[in-house]
Image: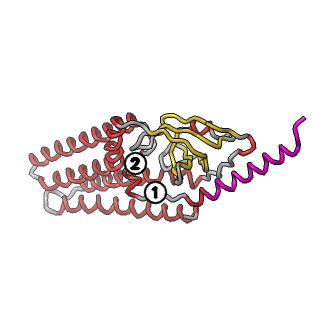
Amino acid sequence: MRNPGSRELRRRQARLESQQRNSVRERAQAPSRDEVMRRGGLLEGLAPGLVSRLAVASLAAGVLLVAISVLGLLVEIGQHDLFLGIVVVLVAVVMAGTALSITAPAFLTARGDRKAEPRNLQGPLVGASRISPTPTLATIAVTVGKNVEQFRVRREFFDRITSGATVVGLTVTPGLNYVQTLTVIRRDRMAVMKEPPVTRAMQISVWLPIISLGSLVLGLAVGCAIGVVLPLGENIFHPLVALALAAVVAGAVALGTRWYSQRLASQLGL
C-alpha cells in the first residue's frame, strides 16, 4: 500500500512546479521582428530541405509569370501598344516579388543550416500550444539556461509531451530552429500540462498572413486583367487605367485584410 503522505508530497511538488512554469512563462518575451525574419519568418521551424523546395517553386513560378508578361510585351510592341505591355510586366514583377518575400528569407537561412551543426538543448518544459505562427506546426516553450526559448515542432513531437513531460531534450538547427529530434528526459504523471484552448480566431490568425499576401497578388492580377481587356483603344490612357485598376484593387484588398486582422487581434486580446 502506498504511503498517503508520499502521494500528498507529490501533489504539492506538482503544484510548485506548475507555479514555477507559470512564473517563467510570464518572463518569456516575444522575439523581435528582425529575429523572426532571421529565423525564416513564416517558414520558421520547417525542415531546410522543404524550405529550399518551396523557395525554388516560388522562384520558378515568378520567373514563369514574368516571362509570360514579357511575351505579352513583345506582342503589344507588334500592336503598337508598348506602354500597356510595360504596365503588365511591372505588375508581374510586383506579384513575383510579393510571393518571394515569404520564401526568400527562409531560403537564405536554410542554406546556412545545411552547413552548420545542430544545437543540442535540454531544459524544463514551461509551455505548449497546438498552433504556431507557422501553419501545421505546434509550439513549445523550454527554459534554456536563464532564458525561455520557443520552438515550432511537428505534431508528432507535440503529442509526446502531452502526458506529463517536464524536461525535454532537443536537437535544433541554428538558423530555422527546425527541431530534428525531441526526447522526453523526465516525465511526471502528476504534472500534466493543460493546453490552452485553440479558438477558431486563433486558427484563422495562423493562416491570415499567407492569405493576405495571396489575396494581394490575386488583386493585382485581377485589377490589371480588367484594365487590359477594357475596350479603350490604343491611347496613352489605356495603360494608365490598367495600372490604376491594379493599384485600386490591390489597395482595397490590403485595406480589407488589415481591417480583418485588427478585428481578429481585438478578439484575441492582442
Q: Relative to the observer, which residue lies in front, 74 or 125?
A: 125
Residue type (three-letter) at the residue carrying disc 2: Arg
Residue drawn at the location 16% of the way across and 53% of the way down = 86
Circle 1/circle 2 CB separation < 8 Å: yes
Q: What element does badge 2 sit on?
A: loop
Quarter of the figure that contains the N terminus: top right
Q: What element does badge 1 sit on?
A: loop
Measured along the vertical axis of the image, is residue 81 above or below residue 240? above
Residue drawn at the location 64% of the way across and 52% of the way down = 196
- What's the magenta region? 1-23
Left or right of 15, for residue 226: left
Left or right of 225, for residue 80: left
Residue 143 screen position, x and y as percent: 56, 50
Residue type (three-letter) at the residue carrying disc 1: Pro
Which label belongs to residue 39?
Answer: 2
Residue drawn at the location 36% of the way across and 45% of the way down = 106
- Mark 2 surroundings: few (<14), some (14-19) or many (≥20) residues within 10 A: many
Measured along the vertical axis of the image, is residue 75 above or below residue 270? above
Q: Is residue 3 magenta?
A: yes
- Mark 1 surroundings: few (<14), some (14-19) or many (≥20) residues within 10 A: few
The tag earlier along the polypeptide, 1 or 2, is: 1
Which label belongs to residue 31?
Answer: 1
Quarter of the figure that contains the C terminus: bottom right
Residue 249 screen position, x and y as percent: 34, 60
Q: Relative to the observer, which residue lies in front, 175 or 75?
A: 175
Left or right of 17, for residue 256: left
Measured along the vertical axis of the image, is residue 228 above or below residue 156? below
